[in-house]
Amino acid sequence: MSLPFYHYLHLIGLILVFIGFGGLFSSEGAKKAMMWHGIGLVISIVSGFGMLAKLGIMGTMPVWAWIKIGLWLVLGFLPVLAKRRVIAAPLVVLIAAIVGATLAFIGYTYKTGFSLGS
């Protein structure tokens, strides 16, 4: 599969993750939204590793890739904190937005050899 395919799949996965965060505000659809959150997490991690493999940097992953994996874990764990009422749902969504923006910044700043414009 091509690098752009993995890139778009990665973005679709992240959209699903944030659909799940939007479901935190819904009392009726929260369970289904969390299902989409989990599916999005799986799609994003698999496609992320696919991109690393395509770029040839899977063996010696750079620091920015490890940071993205750590932030991916944060995105995965935030709904648990909201469900257990450790952090209020609106604050969880704010934290998720900040983490998501950080992930996007890292992804676009430290990419190697791939651009949507080329």
Image (cartoon, rainbow, N blue to C red):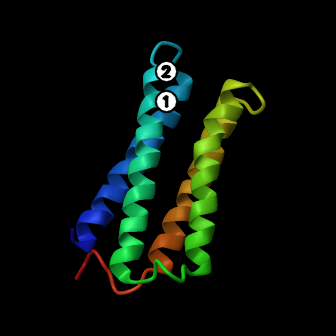
Kindly identify the residue that appears in the image at 57 percent across and 81 percent down.
Answer: 62
Q: Is residue 26 left or right of residue 16?
A: right
Image coords of residue 26 (percent x, y) = 51, 20
The residue indicated by pointer 2 is: 31
Q: Which residue lies most toward the right here?
A: 86
Image coords of residue 79 (percent x, y) = 62, 34
Q: How many marks?
A: 2
Residue 34's disc is: 1
Residue 17's disc is: none
Could you tell me how far apart the alpha carbons at marks 1 and 2 are, in whole angstroms? 5 Å
Q: Is residue 83 left or right of residue 25?
A: right
- Could you classify mark 2 by the number of other residues whose Cα lies within 10 Å: few (under 14), some (14-19), or many (20 or more)? some
Q: Please state which amino acid type lies under the numbered disc 1.
A: Met
Position of residue 38 relative to residue 112, above or below, is above
Q: Quadrant of the C terminus?
A: bottom left
- Could you classify mark 1 by the number of other residues whose Cα lies within 10 Å: few (under 14), some (14-19), or many (20 or more)? many
